[in-house]
Amino acid sequence: MNQFFGQLGGEEKAAIGPDVVEGAVGAARAVQQALGESGTVVATVRCGDNYVAERSDAAITELVSLVAAQRADLLVAGPAFLAGRYGVACGALCAAVQRELGIPAVTGMHEENPGVDLYRRYVHIVRTSGEATRMLDEARRLVALGLKLARRDEIGAPDAEGYFPRGITHNVVAREHAARRATAMLLDKLAGRPFTSEVPLPSFAPAPAPPRVADVRHATIALVTDGGLVPQGNPDRIESLAATRYGAYSIAEKRELEPAQYDNVHRGYDTTYVKQDPHRLVPVDVARELEQAGAVGKLHEVVYSTTGVATTLANSERMGREIAAELKAAGVHGVILTST
């Protein structure tokens, strides 16, 4: 428990260090009530939110030692609800206790708690509301899953058990083969009926469309690709997958890209045809024809390139911002982004 739920005080006690109290104290009483005759809260370990946040590694080591001394069968941390510092501390402690002591652990958080994204792959985190108004109900759900973990029972799917998906997949025998299941989902979607996809899709923040180029005939247009085209030798050492770098390559006075001068380091598709003719990925030849015909004002004399396969969203956004800043500084009005 943190200082608030452990009944040490409010924010003025957030810097207090770890201690342990015999039995259930504060919110741990809800855990004991939820356990009923299935178990006993042997001790309540408490620590201030700021103490953990300001010295995370050392604080977690101290807390793990206190937990180890209790020789417990299960650690229940929190629930932390929407409290960010508390959630991160709960996730870190649960992960460390499982890793170092071999004791199963469970915690609970609201979906917007930063601890969810940090620790959902390592710890069973039960979904909770944002506030502690129904503490006993939340504690019952934590305890139900925690007892399964302690007993080494089979743990069901996240939706069935109420925890956040951990990125773990299991093979199961379905009553219908994939073609029938996919068709049924499609028909439900087209008819506006509820359906559940078997492949959870990532959720990305919407990217607003940029304003259109007012007059392409007087605009400077750049070519950018995530298809992996690089000069021979890959001078910028752009990774074949999970890229962290991009290259900026001059095409000044070039009307075409000579295959002998270029290579392709992308590992996400068959690059044979691009190596035979780089224009299949970066159409400098056609862009020059459009420039010559006056269909576009000017072709920017630098091509930007990286590889998009397995590249993290964070690195993609960073490289995108950096490339965009350079293009804006160069007076580019529009971009043709080519991919695989």
Image (cartoon, rainbow, N blue to C red):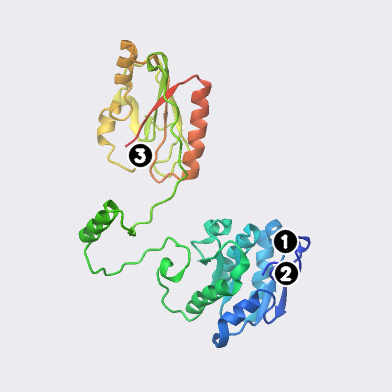
Q: Position of residue 35 (x, y in %)?
A: 56, 82
301 relative to 107 in the view: left or right: left
- Who is closer to the viewer here, 264 or 25? 25
146 relative to 249 in the view: left or right: right
Callouts 1 and 2 close, C-beta under 8 Å: yes
Residue marked by disc 3 = 266
Packing grade of label 1 (10 A; few <14, some 14-19, many >=20) is many
Identity, as a three-letter code, of the amino acid under mark 2: Pro
- Who is closer to the viewer here, 283 or 188? 188
Q: Position of residue 54 (x, y in %)?
A: 71, 56
Give the residue drawn at x 72%, y 78%. Answer: 21
- In the rendering, which numbered label is found on residue 18? 2
Determine the secondary structure under disc 2: loop
Give the residue drawn at x 53%, y 22%. Answer: 329
Quadrant of image for the C terminus:
top left
Pick out the residue farthest to the right.
Answer: 12
